[in-house]
Image (cartoon, rainbow, N blue to C red):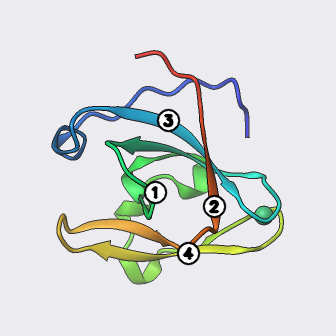
Amino acid sequence: MRNKKSFSFKRDKYKTSRGGHSRLVNICCRKCESIVAVYQKDGPGNLRRMYMDRIFAPAELTDLQALRINDAPTLTCRKCGEVLGTPFIYLKEKRKAFRLYQDAVIKRLRKLSE
Ligand SMILES: [Zn+2]
């Protein structure tokens, strides 16, 4: 995964409902520390789930929200094979997401000027 690539934030009702403050984070495998995904975190709080429409990279994890939830893959570290989360629908927003296993990932802030 290229680290220099720049991304621009997704702006929609979900972002607005969380207060408008977003950060771009690298989601890293807790076990081997390799980057699993680049993710837009909206609003405050811990990262307990990753919404599929907020994943910017890698390509195979983007646009998963278009799949039926039963067809979505588990979130797995490509380097060490650790399973990090499972797909589910966040019912409050009817939004597809990965439920992260507790302490499965580390999030590291990326630099992005807005
Ligand atoms: Zn790993």
User: Closer to the N terminus: mark 1 or mark 4?
Assistant: 1
Q: Residue at x 44, y 34 (%)?
A: 23
**Three-letter code, disc 4:** Tyr
> What is the C-alpha distance between the residues marked 2 and 1?
9 Å
> What is the C-alpha distance between the residues marked 1 and 3?
12 Å
- Looking at the rendered image, the disc whose residue lies closer to the viewer, 3 or 2, is 2
The residue that mark 3 highlights is: 24
> What is the C-alpha distance between the residues marked 2 and 4?
8 Å
Q: Residue at x 55, y 57 (%)?
A: 61
Say the numbered circle drawn on residue 47: 1
> What is the C-alpha distance between the residues marked 3 and 2?
15 Å
**Three-letter code, disc 2:** Val
Q: Does mark 2's beta carbon lie closer than 8 Å to ligand 1?
A: no
Where the C terminus falls, by quadrant?
top left
- Give the residue at the far front of this rendering: 45
The residue that mark 2 highlights is: 105
Residue 89: image quadrant is bottom left
Q: Residues within 10 Å of mark 1 (few under 14, many from 20)?
A: some
Nearer to the camera, 92 or 72 = 92
Cβ–Cβ under 8 Å for marks 2 and 1: yes
Residue 106: image quadrant is bottom right
Q: Check disc 1 and report its element: helix, strand or loop.
A: loop
